[in-house]
Amino acid sequence: MNKNLRITNNTLRDNQRALRLLYSDTLTITNNQLCNHTTESIFCYESASTYPEMQGCSKNIQITNNIIENGGYTPIYLNGGINGGIIADNQIINPCCNSTQDDARNGISVGSGASNIMVKGNIIIQTEETLKNARPVYVTNTCSKCYVIDNVGEGYSGGVLNNSINGITRN
């Protein structure tokens, strides 16, 4: 398990994923430049089926002030039972650039039972002529108490979508 990990002031480019972090407690990813990744630029998750004894370990995730360009399928992806975190003030340019079809992936995705996550003040910019990302920010209906506030972006299917239980959206 990762505990009290800080990833800051790096330039990471031309990989499948810049950062793939499994089971993280108090993780800070800030002020990085991430370019040209084929799947995700930042992927944080826990898998209850792989390590059931570790379920619930992932918490206090902070992803802030990063610049992500050509971030693969989904530039920032939190998946699994992550409890507590913030995704804020990131700039994402050309999200979902490796998607094989429009409307299939999102700029920022939060899913699979995550809770108490705030997605705030991110800018998702599509500079290519056609939109590929489905939505700039997407929170699935398996999440709870997720707050999506003051993000800027557009997608093939429309704007921000927050399906979380007892969540708040304001854009």
Image: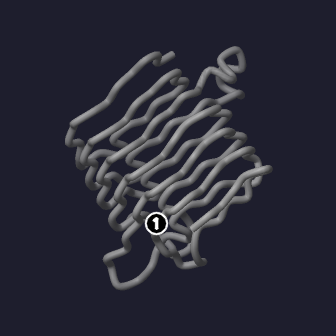
134 left or right of 76 in image: right
Residue 29 picture quarter: top left
91 left or right of 110 in image: left
Q: What residue is drawn where x is 64% and y is 32%?
A: 83
Residue 30 picture quarter: top left
Q: What residue is drawn where x is 70% and y is 14%?
A: 53
Closer-to-camera residue (61/36) = 61
Closer-to-camera residue (167/132) = 167
- Residue linked to disc 1: 99
16 vs 83: above or below: below
Q: What residue is drawn where x is 46% and y is 71%?
A: 153
Judging from the image, what secondary structure is the residue with disc 1 in?
Answer: loop
83 vs 144: above or below: above
35 left or right of 156 in image: left
Q: Residues within 10 Å of mark 1 (few under 14, many from 20)?
A: some
169 left or right of 122 in image: right
Residue placed furthest toward the right: 165
Q: Position of residue 21 (x, y in %)?
A: 46, 30
Q: Position of residue 39 (x, y in %)?
A: 42, 51
